[in-house]
Amino acid sequence: MKIFVATVIAACSLAVHADPLAEFQAIVKQCRQAHEAARPLTEVVRSKRDSSWVKRVYGPAAISYDVRKTDSLVAPFSAYIEVTETLDGDSASTEAEAGAITIDLEARAMRTVSRLRFAYQDSVWQLVDGRTSGSSRSAKGEPFRPDVSVTNSRDDLMKRPAEAPMRSCLGTTS
């Protein structure tokens, strides 16, 4: 009888404790799907600053992640999602001219890398904070040069518009 009770208690405790890795992989999957559906890879739009037309070409987002055990009793796991996006653009005086511009992301380009940090606390993945770095290059074969790096608080990240692809990478935190 004691063995039966111990087995039932163990089974119940396993049911209560979900798999942190599987839960985080679900957040990563949601992030990937949002970025894949986010926007066309090429767009021609009217500039908000002046009357020119702008052609933008976006490379597909590269998304990586990792989950690690920690020595913390409060947050036994930590993780990150890293989203790398590359884009370039140029402008022209008419929509047709902008549409005809050839843009090569292997040459001149801008790149942003956003890293979101998470902690597994109280059996839930919690967004901790994030960091976004921007870099650029002006010619093919050149390395990307760092331009800017910004740390984002959890509160700032949560204020992103619901339709923004990065918002889907924040998990189900409230």
Image: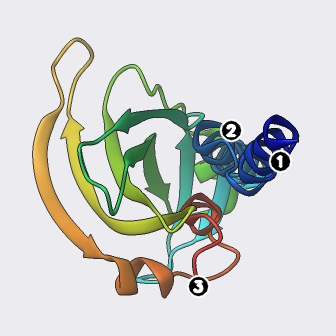
Residue type at numbered disc 2: Ala
Query: Dot 1: what SS?
Result: helix
Which one is in front, 1 or 166?
Answer: 1
**How many marks overall?**
3
* Label located before the other in sequence (2 or 1): 1
* N-term mark: 2 or 3: 2
| Residue 125 x %, y % | 53, 61
Residue 146 in the figure: left or right of residue 68: left
Q: Image quadrant of residue 88?
A: top left
- Mark 3 surroundings within 10 Å by alpha-carbon count, few (fewer than 14), some (14 through 19), many (20 or more): few
Q: Assess whether mark 3 and mark 1 are in contact (beta carbons under 8 angstroms).
A: no
Q: Which residue is labeled 2 in the image?
A: 22
Residue situated in front as seen by the camera: 56 or 130: 130
Question: How many neighbours does mark 1 have within 10 angstroms: few (below 14), some (14-19), or many (20 or more)?
Answer: few
- Point 65% across, 51% down: residue: 27
At x 66%, y 49%, the residue is 35
Figure check: 155 above or below 144: below
Amino acid, disc 1: Val
Residue drawn at x 25%, y 52% as measured from the top left: 72
What residue is disc 1 on?
5
Residue 174 image label: 3
Residue neighbourhood size for the residue with mark 2, other residues' Cα within 10 Å, grouped as few (<14), some (14–19), many (≥20): few
Mark 2–mark 3 Cα distance, whole angstroms, equals 20 Å
Q: CA distance from mark 2 to mark 1?
A: 28 Å
Image location (x, y in percent) of residue 105? 44, 28
Q: Is residue 164 above or below residue 99?
A: below
